[in-house]
Image (tube, rainbow, N blue to C red):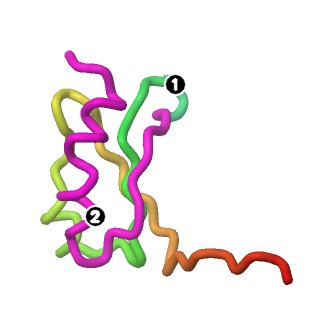
Amino acid sequence: MRDINQVLSEHDKALLAIPGVVGVYVGQLEPEGLPCLRVMVVRKTAKLRRMLPEELEGYRLEIEETGVIRPMRPNE
């Protein structure tokens, strides 16, 4: 199995191109502590769940509802 960071690097653009996906990162499954790929979405919907795979290259994909993410403005 390839390193999870390589898997993320290869698939991040495709995941971010899915409408409603706002971020992807390497995380851990609870309570096992196994590495997984976490996908942040504006809203968890059945349609979005069908569009996302359950795993990529042997790593489980977890969907996390975060809402809209906006960049922070620098302090003025």
- Left or right of 13 on screen, residue 44: right
Q: What stretch is highlighted in magenta?
A: 1-29
**Residue in the picture at 39% in, 53% down:** 24
Which quadrant would the N terminus be assigned to in this image?
top left
Q: What element carries label 2?
A: helix
**Residue in the picture at 41% in, 61% down:** 23
Extreme-front residue of the structure: 76
Earlier in the chain: of badge 2 and badge 1, it is 2
User: Residue at label 2?
Assistant: 16
Measured Cα–Cα span from mark 2 to mark 1: 25 Å
Q: What residue type is labelled 2?
A: Leu
Would you say residue 3 sits in the magenta stretch? Answer: yes
Up/down of 29 relative to 3, above or below: below
**Residue in the picture at 44% in, 60% down:** 64
Q: Position of residue 72 (x, y in %)?
A: 67, 76
- Left or right of 30 on screen, residue 19: left
User: Residue at label 1?
Assistant: 33
Q: Quadrant of residue 40?
A: bottom left
Q: Is mark 1 on a helix, strand or loop?
A: loop
Q: Which amino acid does label 1 sit on?
A: Gly
- Left or right of 39 on screen, residue 48: left
Q: Position of residue 13 (x, y in %)?
A: 24, 57
Q: Position of residue 16 (x, y in %)?
A: 28, 64
**Residue in the picture at 25% in, 34% down:** 7
Q: Position of residue 57 (x, y in %)?
A: 16, 30
